[in-house]
């Protein structure tokens, strides 16, 4: 692919950018990805991801390579200074709703290498490292100036679209003049990654948020022998002094001696809560940390950036393939308000953890401990997050959301002549209409679906006719039945457009999608 052939230039090849490159290339889009560094960053940063992210990797053919290097994500506990259990976050039980473990741990360098290696199978994808964006002109018809750091050469690009996945200090965002909305969270922390060398070290078996007003801190079980500690830096402390090895070992002394573990990485950060005012300017988009920064207390930073990529990729592919850009307006309409909610949820939890007033901490502990005693303190992590409420999602006649609209569609295991497959692997890409096996789609429904380009599939628990997909467990049918539904219309990114209770309602759902595809909402 020559320089001028790229439909999309992706700036930044961290987890978000390289995932977007893979998604676009898998859809047949010509993509050029650039990164200022000459290789992946060799030390861990993000270490947690969820099943929606694994599903995205599955869709680009990278899941098995990624899964081979992941670990189990332990439950998370909040504990007071005296060790009282204040709250616990668990994962859903098997059968898993998306056919992957709900949460996993990983090493970011390994993940990025796997995704870059996966990209090599796509002829439409070119990756250029040691190449930085130094100029961005005319966002409506973008002209980029790239600097090859090895040769010193400068070249220009004129792609149809640009996506800045270039992190918190995004050159793309600054070049567009996009402001960040400050959601009022700014806390300095020290992050320490240790490699255990003593398997008998007396460490917690779960992740723990220590809500100690003297110094809030966090313990995370990473993959293999990686263990992470995060310590709040107190107002009177110098971050550089706290980050000295001798001081780090003092902080770790309640858990480890120097002969029990090796210091792999330490860094000081300010944990922020920020969201960009604009996620699109003309033909230039922002994704990941370039347009939102989330405190790390629910491991949502990278996870939500990859979901940005999944939301945007199919809409860019649609715009390039059809010549119609109306769907692109739904990217910010869907993701920005969603991220404000996610950040708000995370920030509230962070404020619980970061409370330093002893009296307020005591009152917090009493309230949370009481909730634990009544069974209200144990939660499923996924249940914390809202659905997509705006954009390309269905609504009822009265304006209320269609049941399940904006949620991720379940992915059961499917049994057939092909053996055992995850649902997505048994379906073509694109819009899907999943119908309970006991509901017969009418000729009118099938005709309407065909007009819109929707693939129709009946899913049942046992094989009664050749056209049925058979799910191994009752994951999908129980999910539908819980809301009185018999059909789900699902977008290419596996977000549910809406559900319906019968054939007539399903026909109306398809008609609503057809109208919205012609004039997609941007609010």
Image (spheres, rainbow, N blue to C red):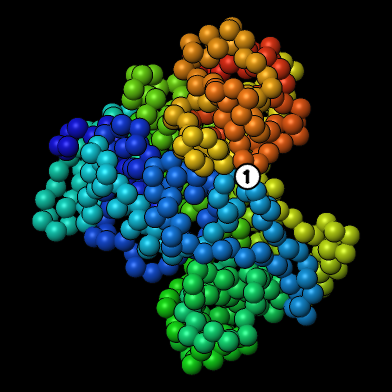
Residue farthest top in this picture = 444
Left or right: 509 as drawn, with respect to 451: right
Q: Position of residue 221 (x, y in %)?
A: 57, 71
- Other residues around mark 1 within 10 Å, as few (<14) / some (14–19) / many (≥20): many
Left or right: 101 as drawn, with respect to 313: right
User: Can you see residue 109?
Assistant: yes
User: Can you see residue 191?
Assistant: no
Q: Which residue is mark 1?
A: 97
- Which quarter shows the C terminus? top right
Which residue appears at 38% of the width and 39% of the height? 23
Which residue appears at 27% of the width and 44% of the height? 121
Which residue appears at 36% of the width and 19% of the height? 322
Please, is residue 143 above or below residue 343 in the view? above
- Which quarter shows the N terminus? top left
Q: Count the marks.
A: 1
Which residue appears at 54% of the width and 46% of the height? 52
Please, is residue 84 above or below residue 164 in the view? below
Q: Position of residue 174 (x, y in %)?
A: 37, 47
Q: Position of residue 60 (x, y in %)?
A: 39, 42
Please, is residue 36 above or below residue 42 in the view? above
- Looking at the image, which is closer to me, 53 or 479? 479
Mark 1: secondary structure: loop
Please, is residue 19 above or below residue 361 in the view? above
């Amino acid at each position: 692919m020559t320089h001028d052939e790229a439909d999309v230039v992706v700036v930044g090849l961290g987890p978000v950018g390289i995932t977007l490159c893979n998604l676009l290339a898998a859809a047949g889009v010509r993509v050029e990805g650039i990164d200022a560094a000459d290789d992946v960053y060799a030390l861990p940063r993000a270490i947690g991801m969820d099943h929606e992210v694994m599903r995205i990797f599955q869709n680009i053919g990278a899941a098995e390579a990624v899964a081979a290097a992941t670990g189990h994500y332990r439950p998370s506990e909040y504990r007071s200074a005296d060790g009282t259990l204040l709250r616990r976050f668990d994962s859903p039980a098997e059968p898993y709703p998306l056919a992957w473990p709900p949460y996993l741990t990983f090493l970011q360098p390994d993940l990025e290498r796997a995704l870059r290696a996966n990209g090599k199978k796509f002829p439409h994808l070119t990756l250029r490292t040691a190449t930085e964006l130094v100029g961005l002109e005319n966002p409506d018809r973008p002209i980029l100036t790239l600097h090859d750091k090895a040769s010193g050469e400068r070249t220009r690009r004129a792609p149809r679209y640009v996506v800045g996945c270039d992190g918190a200090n995004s050159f793309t965002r600054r070049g567009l003049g996009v402001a960040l909305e400050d959601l009022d969270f700014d806390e300095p922390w020290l992050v320490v990654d240790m490699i255990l060398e003593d398997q008998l070290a007396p460490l917690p078996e779960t992740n723990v948020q220590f809500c100690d007003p003297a110094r809030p801190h966090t313990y995370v079980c990473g993959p293999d022998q990686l263990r992470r500690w995060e310590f709040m830096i107190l107002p009177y402390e110098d971050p550089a002094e706290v980050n000295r090895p001798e001081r780090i070992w003092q902080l770790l002394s309640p858990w480890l001696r120097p002969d029990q573990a090796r210091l792999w990485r330490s860094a000081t950060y300010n944990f922020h809560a920020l969201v960009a005012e604009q996620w699109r300017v003309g033909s230039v988009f922002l994704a990941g940390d370039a347009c939102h920064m989330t405190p790390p207390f629910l491991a949502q930073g990278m996870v939500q950036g990859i979901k940005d990529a999944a939301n945007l990729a199919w809409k860019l592919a649609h715009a390039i393939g059809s010549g119609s850009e109306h769907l692109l307006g739904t990217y910010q309409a869907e993701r920005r308000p969603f991220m404000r909610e996610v950040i708000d949820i995370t920030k509230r939890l962070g404020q619980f953890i970061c409370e330093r007033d002893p009296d307020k901490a005591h009152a917090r502990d009493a309230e949370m401990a009481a909730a634990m005693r009544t069974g209200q303190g144990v939660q499923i992590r996924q249940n914390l997050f809202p659905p997509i409420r705006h954009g390309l999602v269905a609504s009822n006649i009265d304006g209320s959301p269609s049941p399940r609209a904006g949620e991720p569609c379940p992915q059961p295991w499917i049994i057939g002549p092909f053996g055992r497959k995850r649902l997505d692997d048994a379906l073509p890409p694109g819009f899907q209409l999943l119908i309970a096996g006991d509901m017969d789609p009418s000729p009118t429904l099938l005709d309407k679906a065909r007009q819109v380009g929707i693939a129709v599939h009946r899913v049942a628990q046992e094989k009664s006719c050749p056209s049925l997909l058979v799910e191994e467990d009752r994951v999908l049918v129980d999910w539908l039945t819980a809301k009185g539904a018999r059909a789900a219309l699902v977008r290419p990114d596996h977000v549910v457009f809406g559900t319906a209770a019968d054939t007539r309602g399903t026909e109306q759902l398809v008609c609503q999608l057809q109208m919205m595809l012609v004039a997609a909402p941007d609010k």
